[in-house]
């Protein structure tokens, strides 16, 4: 079902209110239990617009659980989440201003859909991504949409893949296409859950540079789970150290100091050196 003109107008008005620095994610006393296992306990933090923030911690620290709870993909045991000033449960149409790239993107690689068609689905982003949506939103000739798709693919250096079947892409190519899917419409927030896993070093650096360009040019906020502390140190504004609870939070030179890494990862963690 298409959104009516009045709905589109209201969405544009809401988006227009987001100027300057504002709270884009607010998490208060968030806890998540999976059966008797405590995945997260009493996590609280707030992110303002236009920042690139990394969540780091050891395996099993609850990093993916945190972003999935923020997105509402898994239930919270307690605590509150606000996105763009609204409770998660009342986000409504503002969800279209949120992009998400998971660590793994599982799909039927025999599904007959092209890169351009996948990115085009982001043009009418009204619900979580699913390849099955192509049946309800068939590719139609729309000059504005096609221009946006080409621009998004060009921005991630994937325009040459436009007509290729998604199932034929490499892991790194697929990550770039998913970012193009997020780029095809204006976003306020991009959440990445180990989205660069499997991407080579140069591709990872290019991806980080593009994220910072989007942050600067369009005031995007980026919340990403990462294991690459060197990349985090060079490219992120803020780091959240997590190990089921929030250990510390701050600028990279503070959060990634040896004593904070020791508290986050434990004594078995290899000593980490900043690159200068």
Image (tube, helix red, strand yellow):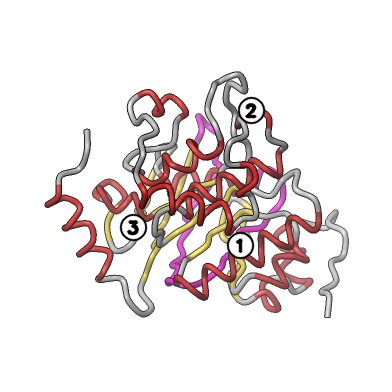
Is 95 positioned to the left or the right of 48 in the image? left
Q: Secondary structure at mark 3?
A: strand
Residue 167 marker: 2
Task: Look at the magenta stretch and give its main secondary structure.
Answer: strand
3D distance between C-alphas at marks 1 and 2: 30 Å
Q: Residue at x 48, y 36 (%)?
A: 117
Q: Secondary structure at mark 1?
A: strand
Q: Residue at x 28, y 54 (%)?
A: 87
Q: Tell me if residue 18 comes above or below residue 60 in the rendering.
A: below
**Residue range (magenta):** 34-62
Judging depth in this view, the residue of 4 and 244 nearest the camera is 4
Disc 1 versus disc 2: nearer the observer: 2
Judging depth in this view, the residue of 41 and 84 nearest the camera is 84
Judging depth in this view, the residue of 59 and 227 nearest the camera is 227
Please identify the quarter of the rendering in which residue 106 is found.
Answer: top right
Label 1, residues with CA under 10 Å away: few <14, some 14-19, many ≥20: many
Residue 82 marker: 3
Furthest residue toward left: 6
Q: Which is more N-terminal, label 3 or label 1?
A: 1
Q: Secondary structure at mark 2?
A: helix
Residue 54 marker: 1
Q: Position of residue 22 (x, y in %)?
A: 35, 74
Q: Which is more N-terminal, label 2 or label 1?
A: 1
Judging depth in this view, the residue of 13 and 251 nearest the camera is 13
Furthest residue toward top: 110
Q: Which is more N-terminal, label 3 or label 2?
A: 3
Q: How many marks?
A: 3
């Amino acid at each position: 079902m298409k959104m009516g003109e009045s709905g589109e107008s209201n969405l544009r008005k809401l988006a227009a209110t987001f100027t300057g620095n504002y709270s884009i994610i607010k998490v208060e006393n968030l806890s998540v239990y999976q059966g008797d296992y405590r995945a997260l306990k009493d996590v609280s933090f707030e992110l303002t617009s236009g920042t690139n923030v990394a969540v780091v911690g050891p395996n099993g620290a609850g990093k993916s659980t945190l972003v999935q709870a923020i997105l509402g993909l898994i239930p919270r045991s307690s605590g509150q989440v606000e996105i763009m000033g609204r409770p998660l449960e009342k986000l409504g149409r503002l969800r279209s201003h949120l992009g998400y790239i998971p660590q793994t993107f599982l799909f039927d690689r025999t599904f007959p859909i092209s890169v351009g068609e996948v990115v085009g689905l982001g043009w009418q982003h009204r619900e979580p991504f699913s390849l099955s949506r192509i049946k309800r939103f068939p590719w139609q000739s729309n000059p504005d949409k096609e221009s946006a798709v080409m621009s998004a693919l060009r921005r991630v250096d994937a325009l040459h893949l436009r007509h290729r079947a998604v199932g034929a892409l490499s892991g790194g190519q697929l990550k770039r296409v998913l970012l193009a899917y997020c780029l095809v419409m204006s976003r306020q927030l991009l959440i990445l859950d180990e989205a660069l896993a499997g991407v080579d070093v140069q591709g990872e650096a290019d991806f980080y540079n593009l994220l910072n360009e989007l942050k600067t040019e369009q005031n995007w906020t980026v919340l990403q789970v990462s294991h690459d502390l060197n990349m985090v140190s060079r490219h992120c504004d803020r780091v959240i150290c997590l190990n089921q609870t929030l250990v510390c939070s701050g600028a990279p030179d503070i959060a990634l100091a040896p004593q904070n890494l020791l508290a986050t990862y434990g004594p078995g963690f290899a000593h980490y050196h900043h690159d200068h």
